[in-house]
Amino acid sequence: MSKANKEQQESTGSAVESDDIHGAVSDTEAIVVDEVAAQSSGGGAAFWLALLSLLLSAALGGAAYYFWTLQQQVQQTQSKLQSGQDTLLSNVNSRMSEVGSTVSQIRTGFDEMKMGDQDVFEQFEQRLNHLNTQQQGQTEQVASLSSLVSRGTQEWSLAEITYLTRLANQRVQLHRDTGSAMIALKNADEQLANLADPRSTAVREQLARDMASLKSVLSVDMTGMVSTLGALLEGVGQLPVKNNHLKPASVNASEASVSDKTEVTALDWRSAEAWKAIPGVMWNAIRELVTLRELDAPVAPMLPADKEYFLRQNLRLQFEATRLALLREDTDFYLQSLTNAKEWTRQYFNEEDPRVVASLESLDELLSVNIKPEMPDISGSLRALQQYKDLAR
């Protein structure tokens, strides 16, 4: 149905409804007038009732006219909306038809271009397939390199751990160096911890046992012992030799000789008594020339100056030999040299002198030190590491 026919039908319907409403209102007014006229003779009450009916009829007519006007406005609004919708639909349809024609033109041009450049498209597809093949190959190569790198990192770590463990065994077996061996084993244990592999637990346990055995070895203070030997070597010239000097006469004898001399000096040689005292003075003078002592042990002969020099030189050589044996960790030669030095010190030097006593105490301390303690076997960590490497492969 066209838009003009719809508008004509709507206007015709509105006119018919308007005529019906006006007819109904006229008929109501006529009836009311007839009733008023018929009842005017009936009295004042009937007149007022008829007037009220007339007013009600007028109100109903006004309301009917208002509703009719409102209905007309609604119908006009609906017609406008319908008209706008139809216009919008027609515009959309026209645009769709234009788009469809444009798409068909593009498709037609594309088909023509494809048909005209079929060789170009085939070359392009071949090139694209070649690039895809290359990309797939490169992806596989990258994945292979990643696996090799990750595996190479682990193998490098295992090689470093193996080197550190072998270095620790070498330092213990060849150099008896427990400190360096402990550091190497600690570094190997840290490298194993960084791998975060549960299979390395047995290796780490063996490393812990080897480190505990290294800690149990008593360390030798080589520096301190060499310093002690150096001090003993420098102090050889200060040690007093036995019986090298005579002890002075006792105090009482000295006082007696002084008193005798005083008495002799006080005598008057011109008197007879002075001549009588001459034999006593001569006896006292002779007695001062010789001193008699009582000894409980046999007296050792005094060393001549040349023998005392060679004694001190030989003692120095013993200390030098002891220091050399200490550095070479030659236990037998070390003990023999210290024993000789101790015996010579006791035999030829004064043991009552504090310097000699201090030297003997230092020699006893050096003799009590084991310069070559037994080294533990830490090769178990190497065997455990080799088993772990076999499992990792």
Image (cartoon, rainbow, N blue to C red):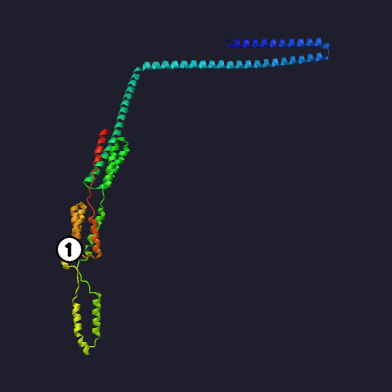
Residue placed most toward the observer, 373 or 74 = 373
Residue placed most toward the observer, 68 or 372 = 372
Classify residue 8 as left or right of residue 303.
Answer: right
In which quadrant of the rendered view does residue 75 lie?
Answer: top right
- SS category of the residue bearing label 1: helix
Q: Is residue 229 visible?
A: no
Q: Amino acid at mark 1?
A: Leu
Q: Can you give x and y, in whole percent of width and height, for residue 120 in the image?
A: 34, 19
The N terminus lies in quadrant: top right
- Residue receiving disc 1: 311
Q: Can you give x and y, in whole percent of width and height, for residue 203 in the image?
A: 28, 38
Residue placed most toward the observer, 99 or 61 = 61
In which quadrant of the rendered view does residue 127 lie?
Answer: top left
Quick check: 28 above or below 220?
above
Q: Pick out the residue farthest to the front.
A: 296
Q: Can you give x and y, in whole percent of width and height, for residue 303 in the image?
A: 16, 67
Q: Can you give x and y, in whole percent of width and height, for residue 347 in the image?
A: 18, 63
The C terminus lies in quadrant: top left
Classify residue 10 as left or right of residue 42.
Answer: left
